Amino acid sequence: MRIDNHMQKMFFGASANIFEKAKNLRDNMTAAETNLWDKISNKQLDGHRFRRQHPIGSFIADFYCHKAKLVVEVDGGIHKLSDHAEYDLGRTYEIEEFGIKVIRFTNEEVMNELGEVLVSIKRCLVDRTT
């Protein structure tokens, strides 16, 4: 796949391997990811465009709004384990080095409190685009 300069800025140097992994993740989204995607796809959230399973450098963000430079992560139970929590902190730090804000929600929040999750995302979008 050939990536022009504009696209390169959106992906922060992601490799072809990361793109392939992202495609696989898009084809196999979790129930919580699908639930959130149903509400934020097609510019449904105040006209902001989100991409799902979006490559950023050596990582894949669950959801990414390039205009706001906002990543939304939906974390399953594995993220509660101490090793994975440490990895997530490092990953967040590295992504934020690109000037991107990372916000996280649990699967349970997305499945049981979707309205509150959407309000939180909207608040971040306003903060990042005004």
Image: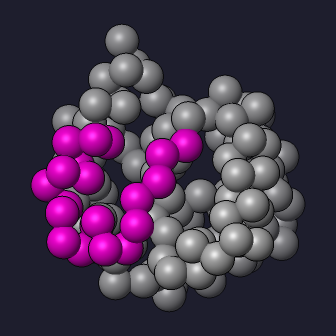
Q: What's drawn in magenta, residue-wise?
A: 102-121
Most distant residue in the left direction: 115
In the image, is residue 110 above or below residue 81? above
Residue 43 x, y percent position in the rendering:
26, 46
Q: Position of residue 114 (x, y in %)?
A: 19, 61
Q: Is residue 106 above or below residue 125?
A: below
Q: Residue furthest top?
A: 130
Report if residue 88 lies within the magenta region: no
- x 47%, y 54%: residue: 104
75 relative to 33 in the view: left or right: right
Percent of width and height locating residue 28: 50, 87
Locate the C terminus by quadrant: top left
- Visible residue check, residue 3: no
Q: Give 39 or 80, whichever is nearer the viewer.
A: 80
* Residue 103 lies within the magenta run: yes
Rendering coords of residue 68 (x, y %): 46, 29
The residue located at (78%, 43%) in the rendering is 94
Q: Quadrant of the N terminus?
A: bottom right
- Say if residue 18 shows up in the picture: yes
Q: What colouring style does the render use?
A: one colour
Q: Is residue 108 left or right of residue 89?
A: left
Please say if 46 is above or below 30. Answer: above
The total of numbered circles placed on residues is 0
In the figure, residue 59 lies in which quadrant?
A: bottom right
- As drawn, the residue found furthest toward the bottom would be 28
Question: Which residue is rendered at x = 47% and y = 30% of the image?
Answer: 67
For the point 36% across and 31% down, which residue is it?
A: 124
Report which quarter residue 121 is drawn in: top left
